[in-house]
């Protein structure tokens, strides 16, 4: 596998992650610009989007290097486990991204006071 082939593989995988990369960059900019107004959820959101941003670059690099390693030499059959392992790690890291974003949604919210919520009139149209 030549360097040109590796670059083509990396770029094709990187382009697939480009929309996610753009959203993560935009989210990070918005979070940092509104940092003083944000709650503790902002930290968790920045962690989630930051990890997703890192994965957009690291995963294509890792996949390219992994393909080079597996397909070089005559040990392809014994190295195929690496693709499954890489996929599982990738999936776990994406689950961590979603967990950070879920925590960001609920972080910093105050718990409703049971006494006040019972005394409040119902919202019209609800």
Image: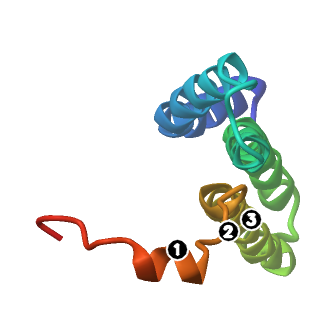
User: Which quadrant of the view contains residue 112?
Assistant: bottom right
Q: Position of residue 125 (x, y in %)?
A: 11, 66
- Left or right, residue 15 beside residue 49: left
Residue located 72% across and 22% down the image: 32
Residue located 85% across and 73% down the image: 79
- Left or right, residue 5 beside residue 26: right
- Helix, strand or loop at disc 3? helix
Residue holding disc 1: 116
- Left or right, residue 16 beside residue 77: left
Q: Position of residue 58 (x, y in %)?
A: 78, 41
The one of 122 and 53 positioned closer to us in this rendering: 122
Residue located farthest toward the front when viewing the structure as drawn: 119
Query: Mark 2 and mark 3 in contact (Cβ < 8 Å)?
Result: yes
Judged by depth in the image, the label closer to the viewer, 1 or 2, is 1
Residue holding disc 3: 96
Q: CA distance from mark 3 to mark 1?
A: 36 Å
Residue located farthest toward the left when viewing the structure as drawn: 125
Quarter of the image for the C terminus: give it.
Answer: bottom left
Quarter of the image for the N terminus: give it.
Answer: top right
Crowd tier of the residue under label 2, counting other residues whose Cα lies within 10 Å: few below 14, some 14–19, many 20 or above:
few
Residue 49 is at least partly visible in this image: yes
User: Which badge, 1 or 2, is on the more N-terminal residue?
Assistant: 2
Q: Which mark is on residue 54? A: none
Residue holding disc 2: 95
Q: CA distance from mark 1 to mark 2?
A: 37 Å
How many marks the image carries: the answer is 3
């Amino acid at each position: 596998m030549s360097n040109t082939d590796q670059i083509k593989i990396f770029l094709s995988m990187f382009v697939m992650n480009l929309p996610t990369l753009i959203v993560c960059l935009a989210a990070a900019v918005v979070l940092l610009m509104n940092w003083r107004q944000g709650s503790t959820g902002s930290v968790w959101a920045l962690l989630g989007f930051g990890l997703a941003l890192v994965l957009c670059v690291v995963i294509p690099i890792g996949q390219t290097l992994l393909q080079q390693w597996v397909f070089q030499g005559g040990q392809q059959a014994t190295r195929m486990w690496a693709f499954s392992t890489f996929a599982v790690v990738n999936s776990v890291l994406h689950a961590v991204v979603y967990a950070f974003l879920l925590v960001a949604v609920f972080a910093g919210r105050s718990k409703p006071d049971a006494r006040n919520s019972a005394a409040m009139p119902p919202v019209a149209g609800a």
